[in-house]
Structures are given as structure tokens and as C-alpha cells.
Amino acid sequence: MTLFNDACASYLTTVNIREIPWRNPYAAFAPLVDRPHAHFLHGGEQRASGWSIIVAEPVRLLTLKGGDPDAWLGEVQEIANRRRIDAIPTASGPFHSGLVGYVGYEALAALEPTLRLPCAPYALPEAHFGVYDAAATFSRQDRRAFISGRSDEATARLELLLGGDELDAPDAEKFYGLESNFSRADYESTVAEVTERIRNGDFFQANIAQTLKARTENPFSVYSLLRAIAAKSDADFLSLFQYEEGAILSNSPERFFKLTSDRKITAEPVKGTRPRSDAPQQDAIYAEELVNDAKDRAENIMIADLMRNDLSRICDDHSIREEAICELMSLSRVHHLVSRISGRLRTELGISDIFRSLFPSGSITGAPKIEAMKTISEIEGRGRGPYCGALGYIDDTGRADFSVGIRTMITDAARREIDIPVGGGITLRSNPSAEYEETLVKASAALSALGLAADAL
């Protein structure tokens, strides 16, 4: 891969945008499968609307691996500032050029002196952004495609990498040996232990995860897994991130934060889960149970309060708004409760300040955040890496959109095994058996794509 030297050109006021012939986004991305730093932000196929984004060949890499997270964030902010261009209409997509990547769960822990988190068991960096001078965007609803970039050279280079409209059927991957780092009995006893700690006043909520692992005889295609999951998904943030060290496949339904060009920042924490049912009457019962469940509502409201507090540190006074609290979100496999909290980012602050204040999302830690993270570290005994981190982009116009790294699958470069971490928030009202079952519901889409079922555990 060639890294070009025009990563930080700051003289531009806009980007070049042109429409290209429509083709299936999967087909467009196919030649880039297994190419490090080529990423595919897509969304589930069960959503009629939405954009697909393809980037490749970054002009610069911003990698955090055993270094200073404060310095790394400063570099991210400096690059974002130097690349800043005027706001442009979004008719050609939400991203045109800028930074794309992820921040792992432990990446910024050193910013809190009292936190000592275990390292993630993956070769992937703690955090990584590629800097991209061009992007291809696809409106799935309107069946229109665009190439945009900071120069004609950048857009032409990316267009040459895209595939046409020919699309082979995805490979049928076969996995075996499903296992977890928790037995059911161990997970349930852990939930009981966490509940007792809450009763003793140590904290109010903690999100505890188990990690499922599956294996296969031969290297597999993460891209085929993405297509299998996407076919039955309506999650907004389904995406594939590819690196030399491995790959991240996320089917996340949860927005961490969105920043608009007018500096409005919105967080959308998700807490509370029920399965879907093919029987309409039973499905309605599940949804009604969730909306009215005292435990799930309390859990959601607690995290909405935490996010409101985090936002208040970086937003203008009196700008915080509760746009929705405990709103029902029904996806293809699960019902969730989602809240929506917004504010106006202070003029003097930027993307690095957002991460310093909000990261990691309170929805996957608990409350108070630091005490919950200490408990998670002690109980899980291993790092999370991209799981429960943030994945997304920072557009050169100043817009940004990041999902919470949940419903995530992580694999290394050898690709003979894959990790599927799944968890849930534990509160005083938690039922150990129900909490364990909730993790399996959350894993169902990934297991189905692997040809496995939870009863194999």
C-alpha cells in the first residue's frame, strides 16, 4: 500500500463530488476485500434507506499502540483542524473525506490515573484512524452513487479500485467448537455478585460481558460473514474494518455520538433488550414488557443521566436537551430502549475533547463510570479491544458519527477463529438467568452467520 504525502492539505474550501454509475455496494467493495485499511460502512439490508461508505488507501495512519493517548488525541485533533473545509450539502452522503477508524475500549484509560485496565488479547492497535482523501458513497434508497474527495487525483484513484456490478454469492462459512470464557453457572454467579456489590453501595450499574469463541478448519472470509449478517439486519452501523493484524465486523445498533456541522452533538444510549418473535401477538407482548419493565427503564434512565452529565462538560450552558427517554427501538432480532440526549458543543472544543469527556460510552460501562470500569476489569480479567469502543468517522467538514462497538466480531490475520463478546448491564433488579439469556439473544445474529446456535455451549 502506498501512503501519499498530501494528508494535511489545508488550503481547500470544499471537496470534489461527482456522480458515478450505480452498482451494488457489495460489488463495489469486493476488490477491496482483505486489503488493509479498506473499510466498508454499510448498515443492515433490512433498512430501505441509508448510505454505504467505502474508503481505501489512506494517506496517513494515526495509530495508538502502547503510546500516550493524550498525545494521540492531540494529533487526531491537529489533523482534523488542518484538513477542515467548508460545510457542504449531504445529498451526496454523510462522509466525503477525513478520518475513519476506531478507538478501543482501553485506549484512553491512561487519561484517568486511577484506572488500570488489562490489555486486549488482540494484535490490533488500541486505536487507529486512517486519513482518507476520497470516499465512495451509495444511497441505497435512491440507488445513486458518488465519488468525492480533496482532489481529482484522489477520486480517480479510488474509482479505479471499485468493482462493477457483478457479485458472486458469499461463501458459506462452517464453524465449530463454540465456547465461552464463562460457563452459564459462572456468569449467573457473577451477576449475583455484582448485584450484591450494588446493594452494598459500590456502584449503581456495571456492564458485564462474556466472550464466545468459534473456530474453523480453514481461513474464512469476514466479508462473507458481513453479508450473511447484513441480509437479516436493520442495524444502522453495520461495518467492516480491515487491518494487517485482523478485522472488526460490527453490527451495532447504537450511536455513541453524532456531531453536525453546526456543532450539535447527540448521544443515543441503548439499554434494555427483549427478543423478537415471528408471532405478532407474542412480539407485541415482548415490546410491551420492555417498555414497562422497571428494571430496564431504570437502567436506561441511569445511563441517560450519565451521558447528560458527560455532555454538560463540553456543551454550552443550557443547551442540553432530552429528545427521547426510553423510546422503543424494534430491530429485526431484538427490541431495545433508546434515549437521545443532545447539546451544543462549545466553540473552543473539538473532537478530542468529545472523546476525553464521553469515552467510553456509559451504556457499556455502567455508573459511576470509573467504578464500573474497575469492576469490569476485575471480573472479566481481560481487555475488550474494539468491543465496547467506538467505530466511525470524522468528516473534513467537522461532522462526525461514531457507533458503540457492540454486536461485534473480532478476528486476527490468520482467521481460523473469531471472538464474539456480548454483555449486558447489571442493576439491583437483575435476574441472573435472564441476564445470561440476554447475552445469547444479542449473539444470535453472529452465531447464525457462523452456522452455530447458542445451545452448542
Image: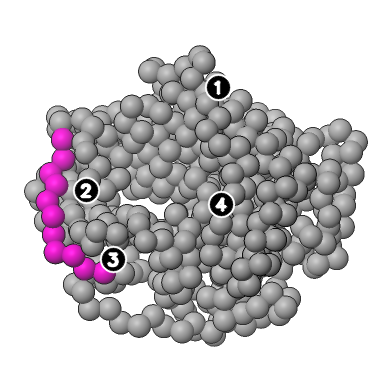
Going 77% across and 44% down the picture, which residue do you hit?
294
Residue 16 is inside the magenta segment: yes
Q: Which of marks 4 and 2 is in front?
A: 4
Q: Which of marks 1 and 2 is in front?
A: 2
Residue under numbered circle 2:
92
| Few, some or many residues within 10 Å of mark 2 (<14, 14–19, 20+) | many
The stretch in magenta equals: 14-24
Q: Which amino acid does label 4 sit on?
A: Met
Mark before the other along the chain sequence, 1 or 2 = 2
Q: How far apart are marks 3 and 1 (CA)?
A: 39 Å
Q: Position of residue 132 (x, y in %)?
A: 26, 47
Mark before the other along the chain sequence, 3 or 2 = 3
| Few, some or many residues within 10 Å of mark 1 (<14, 14–19, 20+) | many
Tell me the element at label 3: helix
Q: Which amino acid does label 3 sit on?
A: Pro
Q: What residue type is labelled 2?
A: Ser
| Res 453 visible | yes
Q: In which image quadrant can residue 406 be found?
A: bottom right
Q: In which image quadrant can residue 79 be found?
A: top left
Placement of the C terminus among the 4 image quadrants: bottom right
Q: What is the residue that sits farthest to the top in this orientation?
A: 317
Q: Which amino acid does label 1 sit on?
A: Ser
Mark before the other along the chain sequence, 3 or 1 = 3
Contact flag, marks 3 and 1 (Cβ < 8 Å): no
Residue under numbered circle 4:
329
The foreground one among 8 and 152 is 152
Q: In which image quadrant can residue 34 be found?
A: bottom left
